[in-house]
Image (spheres, rainbow, N blue to C red):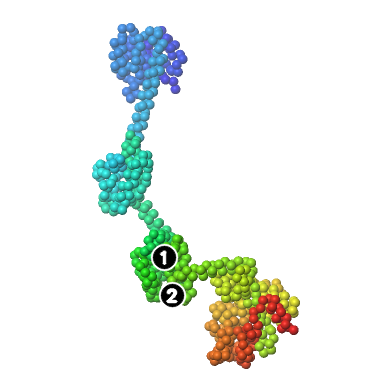
Amino acid sequence: MKPHILLVEDNLDHVALIQRAFEHSAVQITATSSLHEARQLLATHSFDLIICDLYMPDGRSDELLIITDADVPLPVVLMTGHGDEQTAVAALKAGALDYVVKTPATLLELPRIAERALRERRLFIERQEALQALQRNERLFRAMIERSSDAVLIVDRHGLVRYASPSTRHLLGYQVEGFLSQPVSSFTFIHPADRERVKHTFFDLVRQSGASTITEFRVLRAGGGWRWIEATASNWLDDPAVEGVIVNYRDVTERKLMELRLQHGVLHDALTGLPNRLLLSDRLSQAIKRSQRHPDYHFAVIFLDLDRFKFINDSFGHPVGDRYLVAVATRLYRCLRAIDTCARMGGDEFVILLDDIASVDQVISVAERILQQLDRPLEVSGHLLHSSASMGIVFGSAEYNDPAEVLRDADIAMYRAKAAGKSRYVVFQPAMREAAQARLALEHDLRRAVTLREFVVYYQPIVNIHSGKLIGFEALVRWQHPVHGLLSPAAFLNIAEEIGLGTAIGWQVVELVCQQLAEWRQTLSANDLSIHVNLSARQFMVPDLYARLVQVLEQYNIPPQSIKLELTENTLMEYSQEAAAVLAQLRNYGIQIVLDDFGVGYSSLSYLMQLPIDQIKIDRNFIIQIDQNHHSQAIVNAIVNLARGLHLEVVAEGLETVEQVERMRMVGCDYGQGYLLGQPLPTEEASQFLQRAMM
């Protein structure tokens, strides 16, 4: 928008000359020939500059100086004739910007004078606007500071408070005046545990121009009670407008308490409130580092597992189980010192860190005290519950570098305690770790063996001890280990069952037996031969047992009567109700059922009569003692007579002497199995044995 100039001149020649002078200037000129009209134009229009003749027909133009805007003065340039200089100077003192003596030459200089006048007016307006903005910002800043929930301090480089905002009283309850000229280092309302840290933080910041820092500390309110404060401090000491450290601070007590609650939840067990694995690992890590720095410092770890918790949980439900765990945690905690840590690892496992122990006896004393406490019954929800614990103890040493190593060894010792009969403690020995590592290696090899089908079957003859005729074999699994050679079931089968591989191995044996039996039936016409196959309890109870057996037999065209399934009496008694239905289904199909290791379990005669069993195998322990122990002879006689009464066939296991065979013939036993009659044979030798028997 062009600058607007009001020209007040009654001499038309001068007006024309002035307008011609401004022809090439980017301005708009409005001309008037009287002061009266000039006053009207000023009242209704906006102008940036007045150029006027000092003497007009209706008065003097310097009176226009009075009516211009006082906030943004309107510059006035006066034109005078010769001899009017004194009057013009008086007008300048009254506020006129400039004056010119009217000559054709000076009038042509008016554009330059006008440009200067307009520039000065622009600068004046900009300064005014900046000042007004500054005043507005200052009022806004003051309003924000005075009404903010945050408080502000300005502290000089010596730590003296130069300014404290009104919010100080709201936040801390102290009068603002009490803060002024007070050194930060003497703020006694800062918590003693935080005071030195706050002091160091402040003076470290003072030494770093332009730096900022955030810190949290506790303060005591004037009315009492500690509050958490978060302070953001910025070093403005080198800024001339501030020359101080600006500290913005606010109350973060609620957030801090929430953080502490969350932190407690992260580091503690939700059920018992005890430290969890994470917090235990941290404290155990500190104990390890301390033992490495101080040879005289010792610690110990007790890994504890409740022996009967699963039974309690299954019998009374999880709510009772949870309350029982809380009660156990309380008893464990009472057995310890304040410096010790009792943590819950999950489930029914607890770990105790005994800190700064004086002797091994001290740790043993704690373990025995725990056993005594847990031996006492606990009343939970109206139930009187009994339990015990198996514990593994590790004495810490500088050789450990990681908490996981300590827990690993304590866990190994704990499982030794369980294996030894539970309700006891076992102190870890390095040999246990080697055994555990060997076990892990064996588990790994077993999984590989199942995948690669490394298992083979050996066949032990079963003979009619009256005629000497071979009537079948018992299939016995062996593991052809690629490194350790041929391994017997004692070396791996229990472990395979524990890690859930027993069933897979069992099915591989069934398939190998059917393959071999099919070959013997085809090549040797061994149509009357039967093979005994052992089933574990887990394999016996798989839902698709019947369907899978039928599928394998049909795949190799094996008659069902050629397979006899051996199950221990403990398996049949444990699953008596379920077993009856499964056995009936197998029996109806034609598969015969053999009760293995009879006499060593807890069989019931009523179950024996109800279950569809075809044959009983007398446990070899009775056979071994039959020559020396009259009780064993009596038991064997009773078993044979019982079997005859139930129309069951009887097989004597473990026949190793001629005398044993003769005694079993005398009591009426039908069949025998043992090293005297034939050792377990690999497939090729079993084929030769079968071939000779059929000649």
Q: CA distance from mark 1 to mark 2?
A: 23 Å
Label 1 element class: loop
Within 10 angstroms of label 1, few (less than 14), some, or many (20 or more) residues? many
Where is residue 252? Give x, y as percent.
35, 50
Q: Evaluate whether residue 348 shows in this view.
A: no
Quadrant including the C terminus: bottom right
Mark 1 vs mark 2: in front: 1
Residue 566: in sight, yes or no?
Answer: yes
Q: Name which residue lies at 60% across and 70% down.
A: 484
512 shown above or below 31: below
The kind of residue tagged 2 is Ser
The answer to whether 84 appears left or right of 284 in the picture is: left
Give the residue number, with chain letter if any, for mark 1: 396
Residue at 32% x, 39% y is 244
Q: Residue at point 25% right, 43% down? A: 182
Residue behind mark 2: 423
What is the secondary structure assignment of the residue under circle 2?
loop
Decide if residue 183 is on the left or right side of residue 21. Answer: left
The spot of residue 197 in percent (x, y) is 32, 49
Res 370 quadrant in image: bottom left
> In the rendering, at what x and y percent does residue 299 appear?
39, 65
Q: Which residue is painted at 33% across and 12% down in the image?
A: 54
Where is residue 627? Give x, y as percent.
Answer: 57, 90
Examine the image and state in which quarter residue 427 appears: bottom left
Q: Quadrant of the N terminus?
A: top left
Q: Earlier in the sequence, mark 1 or mark 2?
A: 1
Residue type pointed to by label 1: Gly
Would you call the spot at circle 2 few (<14 residues within 10 Å), some (14-19), or many (20 or more)? some
